[in-house]
Image (spheres, helix red, strand yellow):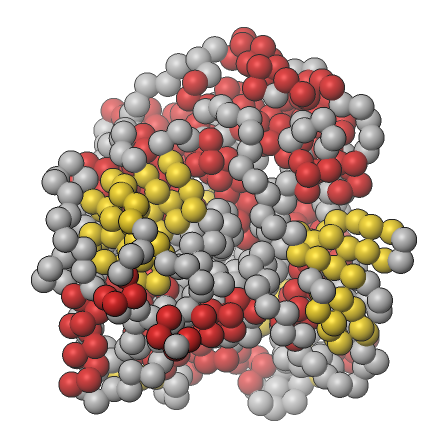
């Protein structure tokens, strides 16, 4: 990377009232993405050798986990306590909570098991908002077109149509769960524009939309009489029937790796979220600590087909410093409100409201070509010009972006006075488990909802569609799972799919040394604890 | 994440009884990892919004509570990660509420302790977000749920105020109740309602005609 400016030099050169040159002629989007988007890196990519997606390419960090050995074997299940339920939901974020509530509304007995604490998720950190086509000059059809176009037409139109059609009803359902949204003086829901969308469509609760959503759903789940919640109970494996082709439950561990529990269920819903903590290509991440792709690993081992495993979202505006917040987001809402991006030379270089993949690629280009800003603490970035926004619209940041201010206060910076240094951060897994409009995966008895599911966002997600997806498909999966649970329950619970996966790994000549799901990143204390304790055989 | 650089003077502190040497720009979570403290299971978002990494903190004579992801390593402090809060004792489901005129009476049944606040300020001092917890509880007890909910706007569900309350008021849940009941009964946005009505008359079919989400036209009472 060519050297740009030091942070001190860039701050000294920065003028909040500097005259800005017009935007340069933009590069053709495909050329920009090919040259600079991390999905197009040639290094660090592997081809899967086993499983339903054999032959597909994905980042090496993910391939290593998809082609790893399970933690447990049938011998480990002897004498383990068994709990029966109708619907087992794995994951305690927005999608899991919506699925649990929807299944319970349909009268199913629901057990929600979450790796950490109910609500510990990426949902709670979402800032900008949720899309729903509710404005007079907008339509559900436009929402459909925007989603497909920004995803480079790789999304499944039937899934996208289902999601965007649910949009207004999802907002109503959220209000019924007790979620608040910002309103205009006349009581309408306030809407914002965002990158790649054709009309104001983002409804929000200041820049705490995810927190407001999660605390309402969390309380709704805790208070619901039909839902039992198990915290700190990570899924270590799914359970299958005699031929290994149907999902009939799961084996849950504990974060210290000391205890196993079997849950026998008529339907299982995976709502485990994404993979940011795998730090693909060495990127920092906006994700919470538990985002280690567990659901993808479990789904793949039991034979569920996945899709678009080579497509990830790098959010353009992750913080660069202070280091303890590196990779954490500054919401796109602030660009929607008018904040510009400037390189080390003080020039704009991209239309800030292009889709996220294009803006990220442009930032990476600026830094790679020597127009980046380098703090002493490591990393590189460009300016997000919050100070100019504040100058143009005094008080806006305090009114609409309290989260940004609260976090900056602790970090000792003031975005109203100085611009903020940003660089793309690993944010979202665009692909995931293949599902139908009911959230059903290709394995009977197994559903997926939220970030772990794929097929909606194509190769790029637009702002506000993640929060919509988790509620739309969370509820769809919950309702379908509750209804299908009227089948007669499973007779036999086995790990036959684990045996089959192990045979496939052996035949392909792959090592059986690595174990997955990862549960926690290995730089954390539970990550280390789990590696030592989770596998009962390694203790003897 | 903060890396050890080795070019700054280190600080010594105690985390869950384990002696840790850290750099002062590390958060308590990062210091715990760097020091190899086992079983730190409460950390999640690392940006102060999930409320899970609750710690007890002792600086000399002063004892306080905080979130570990927003607290920095200092020389000589002792910290202890707290276990997750226990399940709430106050039970209600919003769908049980049929009439908006009853809210205050129902609130008194569900949270009978709320008007017994003795103004000890324990909740206010324990809040890592600087919420005026006591005032929020008083507003809720007086039936002013919209304002009470607004007071709790920055609540991150750490429930440290619940632990601090000698009257067992559960202020965090009072705050959430206030916010939720306000949305449930009073948020009726005309632009949303208009679009829902249009979709009721002419459902969106999309390109592949997926089934509409069941229950999206359910009747509400309020």
Front in this rendered view, residue A378 or A88:
A88
Task: Please state the horizontal and vertical placement of residue A476, each as a whole percent of the image.
Answer: 27, 41
Quarter holding residue A140: top left
Q: Residue furthest left?
A: A243
Q: Quadrant of residue A278?
A: bottom left
Residue B181 versus residue B22 in the image, above or below: above
**Image position of B92 (left or right of A398):** left
Residue sitting at 67 percent across and 85 percent down? A4
In the displayed structure, would residue A464 be above or below residue B34? above
Q: Residue at x 14, y 53 (%)?
A: A492
> In the image shown, does B96 or A94 lie closer to the viewer?
B96
Residue A74 versus residue B177 in the image, above or below: below
Q: Residue A300: where, in percent of width, then height?
A: 25, 67
Rendered-image quadrant of the N terminus of chain B: bottom right
Residues B81 and B128: in front is B81
Q: Which residue does the image show at 30% across and 77% down from the upper left?
A: A68
- Quarter of the image with the C terminus of chain B is top left
Side (left or right) of A242 relative to A340: left
Q: Is residue A154 visible?
A: no
Which x, y percent locates residue B18? 70, 69
How many numbered marks have been drawn onto this rendered protein structure? 0
Identify which residue is drawn at 23% across, 66% down.
Answer: A74
Position of residue A511 in the picture relative to residue A34 (left or right): left
Left or right of A406 on screen, residue B205: left
Q: Is residue A527 visible?
A: yes
Picture coordinates of residue A73 (x, y %)?
Answer: 26, 69
């Amino acid at each position: 990377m060519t050297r740009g400016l030091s942070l001190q030099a860039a701050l000294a050169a920065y003028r909040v009232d500097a005259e800005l040159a017009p935007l340069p002629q933009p590069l053709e989007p495909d050329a920009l993405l090919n040259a600079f988007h991390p999905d197009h890196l040639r290094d660090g990519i592997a081809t899967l050798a086993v499983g339903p997606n054999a032959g597909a390419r994905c980042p090496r960090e993910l391939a290593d986990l998809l082609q790893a050995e399970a933690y447990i074997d049938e011998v480990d299940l002897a004498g383990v306590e068994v709990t029966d339920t109708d619907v087992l939901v794995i994951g305690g974020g927005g999608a899991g909570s919506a699925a649990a509530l929807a299944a319970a509304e349909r009268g199913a007995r629901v057990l929600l098991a979450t790796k950490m604490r109910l609500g510990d998720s990426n949902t709670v950190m979402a800032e900008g908002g949720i899309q729903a086509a509710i404005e007079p000059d907008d339509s559900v059809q436009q929402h459909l077109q925007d989603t497909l176009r920004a995803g480079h037409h790789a999304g499944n139109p039937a899934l996208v149509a289902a999601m965007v059609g649910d949009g207004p009803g999802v907002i109503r359902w959220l209000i019924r769960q007790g979620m608040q949204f910002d309103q205009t003086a006349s009581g309408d829901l306030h809407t914002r524009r965002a990158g790649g969308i054709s009309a104001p469509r983002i409804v929000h609760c200041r820049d705490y939309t995810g927190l407001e959503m999660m605390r309402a759903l969390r309380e709704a789940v805790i208070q619901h009489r039909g839902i039992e919640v198990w915290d700190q109970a990570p899924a270590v494996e799914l359970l299958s029937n005699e031929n290994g082709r149907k999902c009939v439950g799961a084996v849950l561990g504990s974060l210290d790796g000391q205890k196993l529990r079997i849950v026998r269920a008529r339907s299982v819903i995976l709502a485990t979220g994404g993979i940011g903590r795998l730090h693909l290509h060495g990127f920092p991440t906006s994700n919470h600590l538990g985002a280690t792709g567990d659901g993808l690993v479990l789904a793949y081992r039991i034979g569920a087909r996945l899709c678009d495993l080579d497509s990830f979202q790098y959010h353009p505006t992750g913080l660069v410093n202070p280091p303890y917040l590196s990779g954490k987001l500054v919401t796109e809402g602030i660009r929607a409100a008018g904040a510009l991006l400037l390189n080390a030379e003080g020039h704009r270089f991209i239309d800030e409201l292009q889709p996220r993949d294009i803006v990220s690629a442009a930032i990476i280009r600026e830094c790679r070509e020597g127009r980046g800003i380098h703090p002493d603490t490591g990393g590189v970035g460009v300016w997000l010009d919050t100070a100019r926004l504040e100058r143009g619209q005094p008080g806006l940041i305090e009114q609409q972006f309290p989260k940004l201010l609260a976090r900056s206060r602790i970090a000792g910076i003031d975005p109203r006075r100085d611009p903020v240094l940003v660089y793309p951060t690993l944010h979202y897994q665009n692909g995931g488990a293949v599902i139908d409009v009911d959230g059903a995966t290709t394995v009977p008895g197994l559903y997926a909802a939220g970030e772990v599911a794929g097929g909606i966002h194509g190769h790029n997600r637009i702002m506000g569609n993640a929060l919509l997806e988790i509620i739309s498909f969370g509820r769809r999966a919950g309702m379908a799972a509750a209804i299908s649970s009227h089948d007669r329950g499973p007779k036999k619970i086995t790990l036959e799919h684990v045996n089959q996966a192990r045979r496939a790994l052996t035949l392909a000549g792959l090592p059986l040394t690595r174990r997955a799901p990862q549960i926690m990143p290995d730089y954390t204390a539970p990550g280390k604890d789990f590696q030592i304790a989770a596998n009962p055989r390694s203790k003897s | 994440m903060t890396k050890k650089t080795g070019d700054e003077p280190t600080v010594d502190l105690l985390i869950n009884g384990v002696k840790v040497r850290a750099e002062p720009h590390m958060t308590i979570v990062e210091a715990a990892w760097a020091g190899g403290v086992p079983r730190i299971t409460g950390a999640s978002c690392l940006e102060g919004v999930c409320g899970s990494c609750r710690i007890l903190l002792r600086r000399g004579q002063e004892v306080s509570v905080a979130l570990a992801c927003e607290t920095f390593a200092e020389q000589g402090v002792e910290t202890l990660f707290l276990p997750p809060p226990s399940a709430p004792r106050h039970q209600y489901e919003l769908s049980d509420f049929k009439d908006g005129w009853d809210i205050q009476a129902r609130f008194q049944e569900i949270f009978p302790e709320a008007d017994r606040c003795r103004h000890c300020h324990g909740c206010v001092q324990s809040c890592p977000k600087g919420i005026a917890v006591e005032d929020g509880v008083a507003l809720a007890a007086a039936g002013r749920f919209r304002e009470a909910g607004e007071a709790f706007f920055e609540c991150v569900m750490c429930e440290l105020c619940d632990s601090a309350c000698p009257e067992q008021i559960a202020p965090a849940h009072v705050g959430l109740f206030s916010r939720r009941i306000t949305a449930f009964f009073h948020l009726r946005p005309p632009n949303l309602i208009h679009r829902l009505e249009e979709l009721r008359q002419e459902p969106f079919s999309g390109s592949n005609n997926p089934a509409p989400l069941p229950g999206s036209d359910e009747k509400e009472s309020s």
